[in-house]
């Protein structure tokens, strides 16, 4: 028990640090790599950190995949050079922060950050809802993303206009660079 007390105390003392690390933060989006990855600059001028952000809950077409460039452009329209609220509960195997990204809607650019950008990308038909990682979303988010994808498919918007859209995880698995 004597050995466990210091370990327990150290664990409890580290909880506020963990809670602070998980707090959402506001950053400026300074780059868009593709339809589900951005670069954000966080912190004050002269003392900032630049991070690579992978969107939680979506997977967008690869650059050379059909709709890859359109997906990147759609994401740019939503976030480029805008302040975004990043809620990043984890880091992926490539060192990217995996985040829920919120921005102010175009109708109120100076307003609150209420637009879930990942959900917007699925709604526009520019990304798939990434079911393989849905457990990392809340039940409410899963329902919203599933419905958005269903609606985009039904309306044949974005990538759903394609006769046989291939999910990016299948594209990557096949090592594809072009469509036959």
Image (tube, helix red, strand yellow):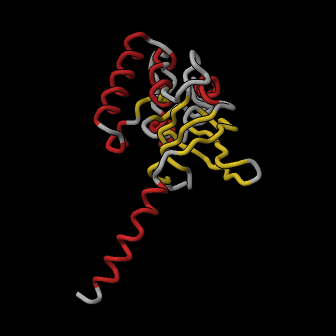
Residue 11, position as x, y percentages in the image:
36, 72
Q: Nearer the viewer, residue 26 or 50?
A: 26
Q: Quadrant of the N terminus?
A: bottom left
Q: Is residue 53 above or below residue 59?
A: below
Residue 34, position as x, y percentages in the image:
61, 34
Q: Is residue 29 left or right of residue 128?
A: right
Residue at the (61%, 29%) spot, across then down:
79
Q: For residue 170, what is the image quadrant?
A: top left
Q: Is residue 45 left or right of residue 111?
A: right
Residue at the (45%, 20%) spot, across then down:
123
Q: Is residue 151 left or right of residue 23?
A: left
Q: Is residue 101 visible?
A: yes
- Residue at the far bottom: name it: 2
Residue at the (40%, 71%) spot, across then down:
13
Residue at the (45%, 40%) spot, across then down:
56
Q: Nearer the viewer, residue 6 or 33?
A: 6
- Residue at the far right: name it: 46
Residue 90, position as x, y percentages in the image:
46, 52
- Please state the total of marks drawn on the protein image: 0
Residue 118, position as x, y percentages in the image:
48, 31
Q: Is residue 180 visible?
A: no
């Amino acid at each position: 028990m004597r050995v466990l007390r210091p370990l327990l105390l150290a664990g409890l003392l580290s909880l506020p640090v963990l809670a602070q690390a998980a707090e959402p933060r506001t950053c400026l989006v300074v780059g868009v790599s593709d339809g589900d990855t951005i670069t954000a600059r966080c912190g004050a001028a002269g003392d900032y950190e630049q991070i690579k952000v992978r969107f939680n809950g979506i997977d967008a077409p690869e650059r050379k995949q059909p709709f890859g460039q359109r997906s990147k452009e759609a994401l740019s329209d939503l976030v480029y050079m805008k302040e975004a609220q990043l809620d990043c509960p984890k880091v992926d195997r490539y060192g990217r922060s995996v985040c829920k990204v919120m921005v102010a809607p175009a109708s109120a650019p100076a307003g609150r950050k209420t637009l879930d950008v990942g959900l917007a990308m699925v709604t526009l038909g520019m990304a798939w809802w990434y079911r393989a990682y849905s457990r990392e979303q809340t039940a409410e988010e899963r329902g919203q993303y599933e419905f958005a994808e269903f609606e985009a498919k039904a309306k044949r918007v974005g990538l759903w206009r394609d006769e046989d859209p291939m999910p990016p995880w299948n594209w990557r698995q096949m090592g594809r660079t072009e469509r036959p």
